[in-house]
Amino acid sequence: MSQSHAIVVGGASGIGWASAQALAADGYTVVVADLNGDGAAARAAELGDGHSAAQVDVTDEASVATLFEGAGTVDAVVSCAGFSTIGLIVDTPVDQFRSVIDVCLNGAFIVAKYAGRHLSDNGALVSISSLNARQPALGMAAYCSAKAGLSMLTQVAALEFASRGIRVNAVAPGFVHTPLTEGAALVPGVVEEYIENTAIGRAGVPEDIAEAVLFLLKAPWLTGEVLDINGGAHMKRYPDIIGHLMKLGGT
Ligand code: NAP
């Protein structure tokens, strides 16, 4: 069987890095692409021979185009770049709102655009949406809005790319311990409240999500799906991060 090729965007850290490792273990050659070019290079070296790295900024179309042109035809794309800010709507500078939308929604669109052009027939794209696509969180207007948009973008792309057999899905993780959530995890009460509002009784680790990413990449009859993976938290409510921060005396 011929070798399968993958790009993991945002692959130098957290969920993206766990996904890159899962794909490599499954036999894919992986391009680890990230804003953090040095981090991507170190991760690709860790994966070993045949794997490579690229620096990319998903908010910059030319940068994403260069990434995909350099990689050639690929069989799988995992779109993980993202970040969040925290602050009530009335206190949030518009530029801060725009910066989150730019990475989490516009960036995901640009990656989907080039994935649609460069994926092989019957290839697959998986994006990382969020529990916050469906569950509102105080102080996270930009992130919730961007991820809700990404969940719908996933369905539109699934319809548009289907003529070439390309499947487009997303995972929607709950609270996962990664560098992105390190700050929130330090606020007393946040992780505890998340866990109280799960059915399974724990927060996630990146490997939980990577396993679902690999499943979605391979499931031949699955497209247009946004898979909640959160220990059951979508059945309850999101932690009040702002409330816990206020108890600390910050915002
Ligand atoms: P992470 O460890 O911070 O990894 C995100 C990676 O994306 C970082 O390497 C970051 O690089 C990179 N990145 C940021 N902006 C970029 C850009 N403009 N272009 C290219 N790469 C960029 O975070 P994570 O928790 O693994 O998050 C991965 C994805 O999962 C995100 O989309 C996040 O929204 C989503 N998600 C996370 C959770 C969670 O609880 N952790 C829950 C739901 C959804 P730098 O470090 O250089 O900024």
Image (tube, grey):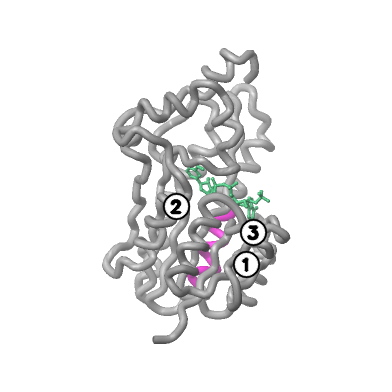
- In the foreground, 248 or 62: 248
| Residue 99, quarter of picture | top right
**Residue for point 44% across, 52% down:** 207
Q: Which residue is mark 1?
A: 44
Report x, y in % for residue 212: 37, 55
Q: Secondary structure at mark 1?
A: helix
Report x, y in % for residue 215: 35, 61
- In the foreground, 245 or 225: 245
Report x, y in % for residue 144: 49, 37
Extreme residue in the bottom direction: 1
Given this view, does label 3 or label 2 mark the residue nearer the observer? 2
- Residue 98 vs 70, above or below: the answer is above
CA distance separating discs 1 and 3: 11 Å
What's the amino acid at mark 1?
A: Ala
Q: Which residue is mark 2?
A: 207
CA distance separating discs 1 and 2: 18 Å
What's the amino acid at mark 2?
A: Glu
**Residue for point 51% across, 68% down:** 115
Task: Identify the image quadrant of the N terminus.
Answer: bottom left
Q: Residues within 10 Å of mark 2 (few under 14, many from 20)?
A: some
Would you say residue 167 is visible in this rendering? Answer: yes
Q: Check mark 3 vs ligand 1: CB closer than 8 Å? yes or no.
A: yes
Q: Which residue is mark 3?
A: 34
Which stretch is magenta?
A: 107-116
Q: In terms of secondary structure, what is the magenta stretch mainly?
A: helix
Q: Residues within 10 Å of mark 3 (few under 14, many from 20)?
A: many
**Residue for point 68% across, 56% down:** 35
- In the foreground, 14 or 131: 14
CA distance separating discs 3 and 2: 19 Å
Mark sitting earlier along the chain (1/2): 1
Q: Check mark 2 vs ligand 1: CB closer than 8 Å? yes or no.
A: no
